[in-house]
Image (spheres, rainbow, N blue to C red):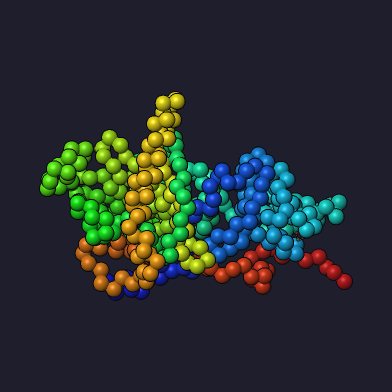
Amino acid sequence: MSALTELEIFNNTSKIPEGWYWVNPSRSLKKGKIQHLKMLGKDFALFRSESGRVGLLEAHCPHMGAHLAEGKVEGESVRCFFHHWKFDREGNLEDIPCRSKLNLRIKTPSFLVEEHYGMIWLWVGGEIPGPLPYVPELKDQEVDFLHGTPFIKACHPNVMMINAIDAHHFTSVHKLPVHLNLEPKIIDQRTIQFNNTTNVPNTNMFTRFIGRFYKGPLTYSMCYFNAHTGTVTVGPDFLHFHIMFALRQNELGQAEGQTILVTKKRKGFIGKLVNAVLLELTRHVGNYFAKGDTEVFKTIKFHFKHPLIEDNSIIKFIQHAEKMNYANWGLTPFASDSYSHKTEVSHEKIN
Ligand code: FES
Ligand SMILES: [Fe+2]
């Protein structure tokens, strides 16, 4: 398996797999507000229109480069602070106040954003976006959710993502009394799911007690989206917990993460109460997973030189990631000299 030491996309800060990346919680952006956003090495102006739609524009105004987030939201558009040019959500220039007639066709780059599970997501990739990250058991269902505390791990997001399917370390680090066998199932080019196939062993009173809550194999599954976001489903047959780990890399190449805890919608006041308790409980399950590995991620230098058969799920995950489309997004900060090829430039003749 020499290919595992010569990886092109996996653990590579300059090649970002095509997919959706978490931006900010929806509640942090009120109607009519605009914010500076630095993400995946680029500067943006993130705003919510007065009708409530989220927009994302390249940060710097195509006129003279002022940061658009210094401006303000006007209806569905953004007005630049400096000379008051106005751009819609698609980046089309709508108004130059010193002109009675707009005779210039200028467009500043805009980016596709959606809201899902109370989070704003950015699409990185080609023209046609794929589905947003989801909880497989609750796909297309109404849900309630809760956001955990954002976190940073000092390694590439892909490396942190491995942790959830590293069955080998569940016994060494987390002392899990069960041996997991995580079977891969490719859903599509960006999505791969791993499902446990082993039953709870009949070794002692504790495992016999736990085993009573599972008809078949112990439920543990991980569904990955573009190798940066993953949903863990765990729990006895009568109650499944769903924890989404959404990651992106920061300018140091570290994993910047946000957990999203999800449960199916339950109706009425009692339903709301049950879900509040359940989501809080899910948060604790999520914290249990995150605990114990923190130190190793501070110093790990990922180099998979000697994979074992026991590492099979990790190998499958990496191989899947290696086949993804990627955006040559780079982590170079916005440079004014690279501006002209990214923006439609329209000059007026000046004598
Ligand atoms: S820099 Fe934005 S309008 Fe002049
Ligand atoms: Fe772990």
Residue 133 visible: no
Q: Nearer the viewer, residue 151 or 185?
A: 151
Q: Nearer the viewer, residue 204 or 253?
A: 204
Image: 84 above or below 270: below
How far across and how far down the image is residue 188, in percent? 38, 53
Residue 124 visible: yes
Q: Is residue 129 left or right of 83 when viewed as pictured?
A: left
How far across and how far down the image is residue 220, in percent? 28, 47
**Quarter residue 318 falls in:** bottom left
Q: Is residue 2 left or right of 83 when viewed as pictured?
A: left
Q: Residue at x 46, y 45 (%)?
A: 147
Q: Residue at x 66, y 50 (%)?
A: 34
How far across and how far down the image is residue 23, in percent? 53, 53
Q: Nearer the viewer, residue 291 or 93?
A: 291
Image: 309 above or below 216: below
Q: Residue furthest left?
A: 203
Look at the image and tell me in which quarter the C terminus lies. Answer: bottom right
Q: Residue at x 13, y 43 (%)?
A: 205
Q: Is residue 74 left or right of 2 when viewed as pictured?
A: right
**Quarter residue 127 falls in:** bottom right
How far across and how far down the image is residue 337, in percent? 67, 73
